Amino acid sequence: MDNAIEAEGLVRAFGATRAVDGVDLRVPSGQVLGLLGPNGAGKTTVVRMLATLLAPTAGTAHVGGFDMVREAARVREIIGLTGQYASVDEKLTGRENLILIGRLLGLKRREARARADELLGDFDLREAANRPAQTYSGGMRRRLDLAASLVGRPRILFLDEPSTGLDPRARRDLWERVRQLQAGGTTVLLTTQYLEEADALADTIVVLDHGRVIAKGTAAELKARVGGRTLFLVVAHTEQAAAAGDRVAGIVGTQPRVDGETISVPVSNPSLLPAVLRDLDAAGIEVAELGLRGASLDDVFLSLTGRSGASREEPGAGEDAA
């Protein structure tokens, strides 16, 4: 299988800071690559370089067989890009936005109108086609933005956190669109903060942290690295969560993730469960729920990066930092 995207040693420095520090990527044609990492890991910077929006400081990459620097114009002809925030013109209607993009891509007026109507139907926007985009809901704008990236029928699609701000139903509708695109032969590079999104869509996952690749593999392979089981507990009183987390860390030897009243941590020895319960009981911490489950990508993320939330902004990336 040939590779739609090949990158070797990609570096992007902003002053003394290396937002991307020697990244290698391989994305086979027709597959979905999930690019994960905490805020500031370098995901958006990688996408911007591959999409020819940002020149690399060092390294090389070929997108669709074209050098992203020397043949940037050819790369732009075969890619689509949906960024973290909708880029459509809010004053124009949905139809006008798509026709405008078609005309900018060189389509004749009739072709641009036909393509706009086709995409409006594909993304369930026909009823709102003649309304200004500023009247659209968040989910409708996101669908319009994705439709806009597909006007030119790209062979390769970059989706930079495409479901940010969408409700669960709209997010799953978007997932179905991505699956349909892949079934039609489109290669997709997806960055996301929703780990279940990568689990649902990606053939291969690459995890970035501080601008470097720290892990890669299928979702199953990455989950296997964690150890297969996660201890989780829910305390009855949220104010006791921090103390419970510290006591769990003392028993299992790993600092757990504390999210509200829920505490979770990968474990290799399931027999620790009774010891945790006894220790919490002795400390007067009331437990509402305690158990074991299989590892999730969230556990992988926490295990690899040591954190699950935002850490820092990506230098130079502005509001698009990922």
Image (spheres, grey):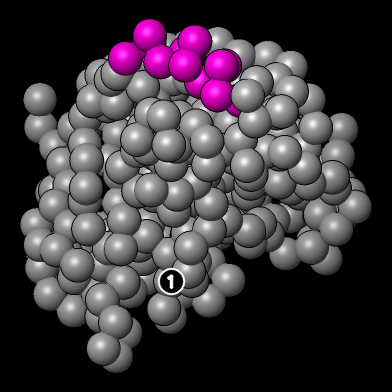
- Residue at x 30% of width, y 51% of height: 208
Observer-nearest residue: 266 or 54? Answer: 266
Observer-nearest residue: 134 or 313? Answer: 313
x and y percentages locating residue 262 in the rendered image: 65, 30
Q: Is residue 307 left or right of residue 8?
A: right
Question: Magenta segment, which residues?
Answer: 269-280
What is the three-letter code of the residue carrying label 1?
Glu
Q: Residues within 10 Å of mark 1 (few under 14, many from 20)?
A: many
Q: Quadrant of residue 287?
A: top right
For label 1, the residue is: 314
Quadrant for the N terminus, please.
top left
x and y percentages locating residue 139 in the rendered image: 75, 40
Membership of 259 in magenta stretch: no
Q: Quadrant of residue 71?
A: bottom left
| Residue 194, above or below 91 | above
Could you say whether the residue bearing mark 1 is in a helix, strand or loop? Answer: loop
Membership of 276 in magenta stretch: yes
